[in-house]
Image (cartoon, rainbow, N blue to C red):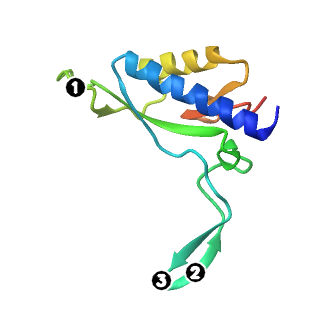
């Protein structure tokens, strides 16, 4: 499968996952998807080139095959799914991850390295 084919497949699957999350009554947002490294940055008025230091070396974010999602559910029981869920062990995250992993043989998740909100295609396989 070419990189183009993988990126198209990943885009479709992650979009389907977002719609599935919404159907559960939760809110979700894309956080980081494709990350360019190295990339231009500014330090004061000076233009510099920097490497990404947030993601793991060889992260699939660099290939456009990974996305971080931000999840909101109704933690305070006020009827609004507007509370940020940072805990990757929360039952909602567990359901989302299980659903993702069932969607395709190449679907992978960052729980192996403590990053439950990281969804990728083929990473670590």
Front residue of 76 and 9: 9
Check residue 80 in the rendering and tell me which mark sits there, or answer none: 1
Tell me how many marks there are.
3
Q: Residue drawn at (56%, 44%), measured in percent from left and top?
A: 33
Q: CA distance from mark 1 to mark 3?
A: 41 Å
Residue 112 visible in the shown view:
no
Upstream in sequence: badge 1 or badge 3? 3
Q: Is residue 22 visible?
A: yes
Q: Is residue 89 above or below residue 24?
A: below
- Residue at the spot of label 3: 44
Q: Is residue 49 above or below residue 61?
A: below
Q: Quadrant of the C terminus?
A: top right
Q: Nearer the viewer, residue 3 or 111?
A: 3
Look at 42% across and 20% down and name the residue there.
92
- 75 to the left or right of 51: left
**Mark earlier in primary sequence (1, 2):** 2
Vertical comparison of 110 with 61: above or below: above
Residues at discs 3 and 2 in contact (Cβ within 8 Å)? no
Determine whether label 1 and label 3 are within 8 Å by CB: no
Where in the figure is residue 91, as x and y percent of width and height? 43, 17
What residue is disc 2 on? 47
Question: Distance from label 1 to label 2 (Cα)?
Answer: 43 Å
């Amino acid at each position: 499968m070419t990189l183009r084919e993988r990126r198209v497949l990943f885009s479709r699957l992650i979009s389907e996952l977002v719609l599935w999350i919404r159907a559960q009554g939760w809110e979700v947002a894309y956080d980081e998807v494709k990350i360019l490294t190295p990339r231009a940055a500014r330090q004061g008025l000076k233009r510099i080139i920097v490497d990404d230091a947030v993601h793991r070396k060889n992260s699939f974010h660099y290939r456009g095959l990974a996305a971080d999602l931000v999840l909101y559910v109704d933690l305070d029981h006020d009827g609004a799914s507007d509370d940020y869920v940072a805990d990757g062990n929360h039952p909602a995250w567990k359901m989302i991850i299980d659903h993702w992993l069932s969607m395709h043989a190449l679907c992978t998740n960052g729980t192996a390295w403590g990053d439950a909100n990281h969804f990728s295609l083929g990473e670590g396989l």
